[in-house]
């Protein structure tokens, strides 16, 4: 069974994550904002400037055992839904530490989870970079397939 982190350990990780994200923002012009979620959950968001997608927002939630993370990729496809979901699932085969998932209102998300024992600045940086790169690579083809008639006018 995974170790449960106590309040003191979680408080230390919370401070470290705050510091790591502050450093990422200072060093990376692609990061537009880093902020904390409200409420009882220990939650952060990292908003990044994209190229294929204007903005990519990553959410991180600190739990007693894991750091969960997710990014909203696109709304539910209006066309070719089965093909969009199939393409996303096929991409899952090559991904490490993240996976595409269907979420609220059939929107497409990228999600992952990391054991707290493996959490470090380097690992958090890898997660941010991997999620950014995956969304940037997948978004253009997924959105064009899911909203094909909208893009037909551009041809």
Image (spheres, grey):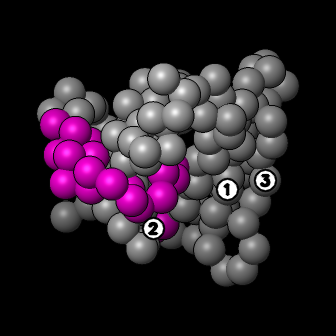
Distance in Å between CA atoms under marks 3 and 1:
6 Å
Indicate whether residue 2 is drawn in magenta: no
Q: Quadrant of residue 43?
A: bottom right
In percent of the image, x 43 and y 24: which residue is there? Answer: 137
What residue span does the magenta drawing correspond to? 63-90
Q: Compare marks 2 and 3 and give the one earlier in the sequence.
A: 3
Q: Which residue in the protein does label 1 denote?
A: 44
| Residue 136 in the image: above or below residue 62 | above
Viewer-closest of 45 and 102: 102
Q: Secondary structure at mark 2?
A: loop
Q: Secondary structure at mark 3?
A: strand
Q: Quadrant of residue 16?
A: top right
Q: Compare marks 3 and 1 and give the one earlier in the sequence.
A: 3
- Please provide percent x and percent y for residue 126: 48, 26
Marks 2,1: beta carbons within 8 A? no
Image quadrant containing the N terminus: bottom left
Indicate whether residue 66 is drawn in magenta: yes
Q: Please say whether residue 37 is visible from this viewpoint.
A: yes
- Please provide percent x and percent y for residue 139: 45, 35
- Please provide percent x and percent y for residue 127: 47, 34
Marks 3,1: beta carbons within 8 A? yes
Q: Which residue in the protein does label 3 denote?
A: 35
Foreground disc of the pair 2, 3: 3
Q: Which residue in the protein does label 2 denote?
A: 64
Distance in Å between CA atoms under marks 2 and 3:
21 Å
In percent of the image, x 20 and y 46: which residue is there? Answer: 83
Q: Compare marks 2 and 1 and give the one earlier in the sequence.
A: 1
Viewer-closest of 151 and 30: 151
Q: Secondary structure at mark 1?
A: strand
In percent of the image, x 84 and y 25: which residue is there? Answer: 26
- Please provide percent x and percent y for residue 85: 24, 50
């Amino acid at each position: 069974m995974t170790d449960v982190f106590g309040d003191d350990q979680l408080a230390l990780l919370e401070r470290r994550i705050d510091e790591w994200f502050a450093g990422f923002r200072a060093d990376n012009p692609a990061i537009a904002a880093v902020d904390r979620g409200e409420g009882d959950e220990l939650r952060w968001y990292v908003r990044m400037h994209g190229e294929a997608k204007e903005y990519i927002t990553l959410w991180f939630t600190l739990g007693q055992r894991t750091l969960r993370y997710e990014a909203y990729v696109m709304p539910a496809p209006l066309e070719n839904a089965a093909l969009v979901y199939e393409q996303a699932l096929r991409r899952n085969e090559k991904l490490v530490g993240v996976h595409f998932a269907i979420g609220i209102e059939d929107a497409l998300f990228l999600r992952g989870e990391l054991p707290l024992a493996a959490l470090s600045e380097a690992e958090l940086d890898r997660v941010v970079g991997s999620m950014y790169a995956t969304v940037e690579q997948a978004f253009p083809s997924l959105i064009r397939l899911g909203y094909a008639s909208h893009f037909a006018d551009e041809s």
